[in-house]
């Protein structure tokens, strides 16, 4: 495929089984972190060359139209693996230290979720798009406060015509409070909220505070992939082989009212 040419994987002096081990480590790491892809539909991938996603035409003046577009953000996180370590792995099956790859996969996943949830320079995210709903959270110190806040947010979405199903992402401090169990019934607040946000309740490490609840489905929002997360070969250095984890993506929001930011 054309994308493989730009990733230069065939140029790397390593065996196919080594690529399989590296790819598996990348996928396992990314899946343990990514939240946006678990909340929204993913469209694509459409290819490494995708630089923008066209939207509907807008009328500039009478008889004159032009299309708008959303820029596709590119992510590239580099790492190196030692030549001798790779040679030992391929010759004798000795354990291969993939920690540099794992660290790069963590950074790539964090960049992706940050773009999807918070946006960036010139990019909007779920939490800063014009027209979304906003609800202030209580302290959640009291048992029952967290489900009450989520129910209130869902009622607001329901009243606006967005009836679910819903997915919920929370900052780690907020998420961790949900492990508390009710004294009667012995169920946790997390279990209670999972009956409301039936598409998932997720811990989002890129959120320092608060969270968001969204209606799931393409008609509301989706992630468009240009290049799905992959490992590219950059080239040799004196002692190492240099690689990079590469991906590109854009967030499309079609119904801002289907999103509710939970603020502190």
Image: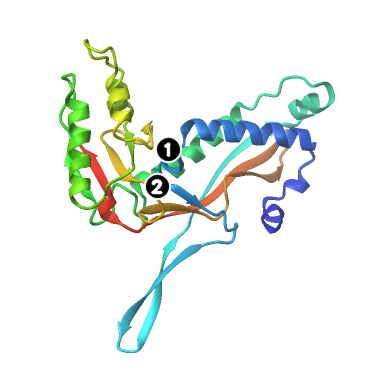
Residue highlighted by disc 2 = 116
- Left or right: where 128 falls relative to 238: left
Residue at 48%, 63% (x, y): give it. Answer: 52
Residue 60: image x %, image y %?
A: 32, 81
Indicate which disc residue 35 carries.
1
Residue 16: image x %, image y %?
A: 78, 38
| Foreground pick, 77 / 218 | 218
Crowdedness near tag 2: few (<14), some (14–19) or many (≥20) residues, C-alpha within 10 Å: many
Q: Secondary structure at mark 1?
A: loop
Q: CA distance from mark 1 to mark 2?
A: 9 Å
Residue 247: image x %, image y %?
A: 55, 48
**Quadrant housing residue 219:** bottom left
Residue at 28%, 51% (x, y): give it. Answer: 258
| Foreground pick, 183 / 110 | 183
Residue at 27%, 33% (x, y): give it. Answer: 209
Q: Secondary structure at mark 2?
A: helix
- Left or right: where 232 falls relative to 52: right
Pointers 1 and 2 in contact (C-beta within 8 Å): yes
């Amino acid at each position: 495929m054309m994308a493989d040419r730009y990733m230069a994987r065939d140029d790397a002096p390593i065996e196919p089984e080594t690529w399989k081990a590296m790819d598996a480590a990348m996928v396992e790491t990314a899946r343990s972190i990514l939240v946006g892809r678990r909340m929204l539909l993913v469209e694509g991938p459409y290819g490494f060359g995708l630089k923008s996603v066209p939207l509907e035409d807008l009328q500039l003046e009478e008889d004159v139209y032009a299309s708008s577009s959303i820029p596709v953000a590119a992510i590239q996180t580099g790492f190196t693996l030692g030549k001798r370590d790779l040679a030992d792995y391929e010759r004798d099956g000795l354990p291969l230290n993939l920690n540099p790859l794992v660290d790069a996969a963590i950074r790539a996943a964090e960049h992706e979720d940050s773009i999807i949830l918070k946006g960036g320079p010139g990019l909007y995210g779920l939490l800063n798009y014009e027209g979304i709903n906003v609800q202030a959270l209580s302290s959640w110190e009291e048992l029952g406060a967290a489900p009450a806040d989520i129910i209130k947010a869902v009622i607001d979405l329901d009243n606006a015509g967005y009836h679910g199903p819903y997915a919920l992402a929370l900052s780690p401090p907020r998420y961790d409070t949900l492990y508390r169990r009710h004294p009667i019934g012995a169920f946790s607040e997390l279990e209670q909220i999972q009956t409301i946000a039936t598409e998932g309740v997720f811990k989002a490490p890129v959120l320092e505070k608060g969270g968001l609840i969204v209606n799931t489905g393409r008609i509301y929002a989706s992630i468009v992939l240009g290049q799905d997360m992959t490992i590219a070969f950059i080239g040799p250095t004196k002692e190492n082989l240099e690689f990079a984890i590469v991906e590109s993506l854009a967030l499309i929001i079609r119904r801002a009212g289907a999103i509710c930011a939970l603020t502190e």
